[in-house]
Image (cartoon, helix red, strand yellow):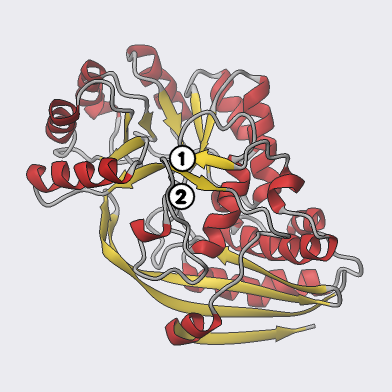
């Protein structure tokens, strides 16, 4: 394919309720949609960067800028572009994995639509539906948290993830276990909020039989995670630390984690996400698919990824109504705790253009 144009469209998409983590509260998603126009057709991708650099160093405005100024010119220069060729073409730009992932997804979407092949099939998916968990932010009160968990369980979610931080860990986990019992698949996510000095507080959580503790320490502290893993019976899962297949292998081999969360945006795209899946499978380490409050444009390829065989645990690929009153694609609806994997060509979904136009805050068009 030859790339002819790239449209960078910003949307302000309201959330159905504020989502609070250890690094801040979101009440709407500042979404960057990437549309590529090639001589063979068009494709869509969603950049998962947040509005501010709090989850990672990337943020939406910077992603748009680096695409316009540095990434797009490199892709325009490629004479015969493919999805697998995106990352090699962009290798000269250091970092900016979320921006690169959005471009790779859009190019893959265009390419696979031309072939009439679904992304799930292309990546090696083996399921037509995937089990779903739900991520629950830090609540105003314990009672509000228990009520929220009850509501999601009533909807059929198969796993609950609680966001935690120092001062909001022991009490909420105690309350949820007491309310819903030991059979509930329950895990917690610290988003790097702890350090070695607070490790004793984390070790207390061994009492609850958690599925895992996700990313307790800062990204770079592989050694600290390994030491914590040796001192706990609860499995340690890494998220922010894992940005490539080589780092995943290193973290596992050093004993820093026994479970890995894969987010395609965090690792630079779905091609690298599959490499991480394969490396972890070869090491006997299960993986699951994380989420970044994506719209349907980002949720669809996540479901395709989660259909691969080593995705052993329910992910954060929740239904559309978990976050949005109206999704910009046809909504993903929970059925028996699962979501269907899109089977149409490319990412398998199309946007509701009228709603997209309504939510648009800016459009930037780049031409070859």
Q: Quick one: quadrant of the C terminus?
A: bottom right
Residue positioned 33% across, 28% down in the render? 185
Taking the image as drawn, is residue 36 in sight?
A: yes
Taking the image as drawn, is residue 89 in sight?
A: no
Residue positioned 24% across, 20% down in the render? 182
Q: Which mark is residue 162?
A: none
| Chain-order first, disc 1 or disc 2 | 2
Q: Position of residue 128 (x, y in %)?
A: 62, 42
Image side of residue 63 versus residue 90, left or right: left
Q: Position of residue 358 (x, y in %)?
A: 44, 86
From the viewer's perspective, is residue 331 above or below residue 124? Answer: below
Image label count: 2
Residue positioned 31% across, 23% down in the render? 210
Q: Which mark is residue 315?
A: 1
- In what element is the residue under mark 2? loop
Residue positioned 39% across, 65% down in the render? 52
Specify few, some or many for label 2: CA neighbours under 10 Å numbering under 14, 14-19, or 20 or more.
Answer: many
- Location of mark 2 (residue): 291
Q: Position of residue 278 (x, y in %)?
A: 69, 30
């Amino acid at each position: 394919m030859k790339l002819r144009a790239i449209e960078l469209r910003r949307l302000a998409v309201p959330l159905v309720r504020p989502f609070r983590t250890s690094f801040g509260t979101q009440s709407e998603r500042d979404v960057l949609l990437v549309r590529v126009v090639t001589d063979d057709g068009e494709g869509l991708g969603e950049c998962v960067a947040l509005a501010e650099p709090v989850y990672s160093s990337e943020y939406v405005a910077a992603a748009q800028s680096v695409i316009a100024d540095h990434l797009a010119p490199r892709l325009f220069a490629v004479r015969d572009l493919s999805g697998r060729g995106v990352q090699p073409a962009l290798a000269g730009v250091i970092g900016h994995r979320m921006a690169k992932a959005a471009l790779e997804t859009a190019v893959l979407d265009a390419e696979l639509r031309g072939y009439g092949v679904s992304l799930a099939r292309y990546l090696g998916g083996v399921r037509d539906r995937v089990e779903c968990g739900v991520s629950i932010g830090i609540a105003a009160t314990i009672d509000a948290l228990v009520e929220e968990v009850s509501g999601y369980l009533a909807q059929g979610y198969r796993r609950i993830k609680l966001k935690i931080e120092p001062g909001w860990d022991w009490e909420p986990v105690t309350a949820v276990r007491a309310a819903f019992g030991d059979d509930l698949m329950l895990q917690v996510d610290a988003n790097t909020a702890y350090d070695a000095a607070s490790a004793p507080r984390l070790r207390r959580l061994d009492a609850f039989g958690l599925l895992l503790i996700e990313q307790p320490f800062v990204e770079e502290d592989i050694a600290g995670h390994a030491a914590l893993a040796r001192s706990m019976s609860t499995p340690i899962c890494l998220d922010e630390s894992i940005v490539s297949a080589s780092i995943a292998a290193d973290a596992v081999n050093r004993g820093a984690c026994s479970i890995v969360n894969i987010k395609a945006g965090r690792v630079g795209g779905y091609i690298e996400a599959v490499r991480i899946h394969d490396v972890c499978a070869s090491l006997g380490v299960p993986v699951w698919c994380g989420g970044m409050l994506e719209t349907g444009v980002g949720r669809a390829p996540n479901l395709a990824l989660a259909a691969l065989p080593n995705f052993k645990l329910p992910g954060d690929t929740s239904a559309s109504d978990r976050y949005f009153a109206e999704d910009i694609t046809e909504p993903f609806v929970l059925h028996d705790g699962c979501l269907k994997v899109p089977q149409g060509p490319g990412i398998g979904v199309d946007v509701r253009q009228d709603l997209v136009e309504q939510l648009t805050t800016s459009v930037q068009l780049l031409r070859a």
